[in-house]
Amino acid sequence: MSKFGGRGYGMCILFVIIGAILGGILGELLKNVPSLEGVMPYLVTTFPVFDMAPVTIDLYVIRLTVGLAFMPNLMSMLGIIVAIALYRRY
């Protein structure tokens, strides 16, 4: 078990999620750069890995719709790799 504030599994998962999000955002920002227009379509193409159709639960007072999709692109994978490297280094 890791101590409170230690570097446990939760912190590693947080690093990976933040790395994937930042990598995806960086890819979307760089998509329109003219000097990278030959490479960026390959780096920002998403690959559906997991896609759960939305499920609606109607409780007559509250209607809850839940769905989950994991569709990374190569830039988000690069963000995950950088995040893991930073986690291991620091």
Image (cartoon, rainbow, N blue to C red):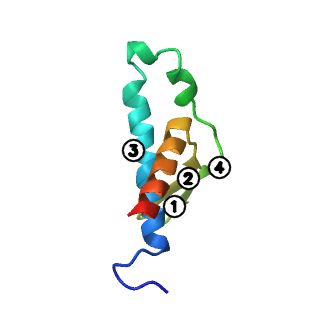
Of callouts 4 and 2, the N-terminal one: 4
Of the residues under marks 3 and 4, which one precedes in the sequence? Answer: 3
Residue receiving disc 4: 50
**Quick one: label 3, few (<14), some, or many (20+) residues within 10 Å?**
some
Q: In the drawing, does residue 4 fall left or right of residue 24?
A: left
Q: Nearer the viewer, mark 3 or mark 4?
A: 3
Determine the residue located farthest toward the left in the rendered image.
5
Residue in the picture at 46% in, 49% down: 82
Mark before the other along the chain sequence, 1 or 4:
4
Bin the neighbour count of mark 2 within 10 Å (Cα to Cα): few under 14, some 14-19, many 20 and up.
Answer: few
Report helix, strand or loop for mark 2. strand
Answer whether labels 3 and 2 touch (C-beta < 8 Å).
no
57 left or right of 61 in image: right
Image spot of residue 69 (x, y percent)? 57, 48
Mark-to-mark CA distance, 3 and 2: 19 Å
Alpha carbons under labels 1 and 4: distance apart: 25 Å
Q: Nearer the viewer, mark 1 or mark 4?
A: 4
Query: Which label lies toward us, 3 or 2?
Result: 3
* Between 53 and 25, the one nearer to me in the picture: 25
For label 3, the residue is 22
Name which residue lies at 41% across and 30% down.
Answer: 28
**In the rendered image, is residue 88 in sight?**
yes
Q: Give the residue type at disc 1.
A: Asp
- Residue 73, given in percent of the width and then of the height, sits at 55, 37
Image position of 48 (left or right of 90)? right
Q: Which mark is residue 58?
A: 1
Q: Which residue is mark 2?
A: 68
